[in-house]
Image (tube, helix red, strand yellow):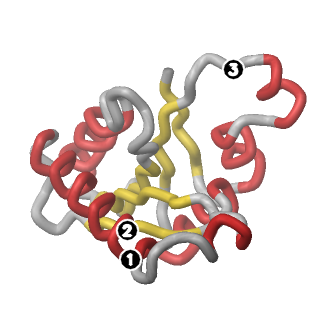
Amino acid sequence: MFNKILVPIDLEHTDPGSRALPAALELADKHGSQITLIHIIPIIPAIVAQNLPEGHEKKVAAQLKAELEALAVKYALAADTQIEVIHGAVYPEIIQCAEDIEADVIIMFSHRPGLSDYLLGSVAARVVRHAKSSVLVLR
């Protein structure tokens, strides 16, 4: 039923993956699924990007990929776990990645919504509304 599982991880969260990864691991074990972990690096405004040292984005992406790999080890994910670091707008990139890998389910964590989330919509809410695959949102 769930052959491919996409787990977006916000590495800026105090305990990234603490809710989503155990759930993904449980589903993967039950269904023999492959897990893909992704982190989205938000687009840096041009005015800021022009002042960053050359190669800064690649260095940050490599560091974040290493952090995702450490999470995969910490939660004992399978060796075939895919790890991606993507630059772009967060929720559209999650949806695009889910389509690209043909994910059967997206498992993501959502924080308690604040007032701005009600006015603008949280990333999880946008993914739920626009994803073609099932979405499991954990709190």
Q: Is residue 102 above or below residue 35?
A: below
**Which residue is label 3 attached to?**
113
Determine contact: label 1, label 2, CB under 8 Å.
Answer: yes
Percent across and percent down for residue 17 are 33, 37
Instruction: Look at the numbered disc 3 and give the secondary structure of its residue.
Output: loop
* Residue nearest the viewer, comparing 41 with 129: 41
Q: Is residue 29 above or below residue 117?
A: below
**Which residue is label 1 attached to?**
58
**Which residue is label 2 attached to?**
61
Tell me what residue is drawn at x 54 percent, y 33 percent.
137
Percent across and percent down for residue 31 are 27, 51
Q: Please name the amino acid that badge 1 sits on.
A: Lys
Instruction: Look at the numbered disc 2 and give the secondary structure of its residue.
Output: helix
Percent across and percent down for residue 10 are 45, 43
**Which quadrant of the figure has residue 32?**
bottom left
- Is residue 1 at least partly visible in the picture? no
Tell me what residue is drawn at x 28 percent, y 62 percent.
63
Quadrant in which the N terminus is drawn: bottom left
Q: For the view shown, which residue lies furthest in the bottom direction?
A: 54
- Is residue 124 at least partly visible in the picture? yes
Crowding near the residue tagged with mark 1, few <14, some 14–19, many ≥20 C-alpha atoms within 10 Å: few
Q: Is residue 73 above or below residue 102?
A: above
CA gap between label 1 and label 3 equals: 32 Å
Q: Please name the amino acid that badge 3 sits on.
A: Pro
Q: Please name the amino acid that badge 2 sits on.
A: Ala
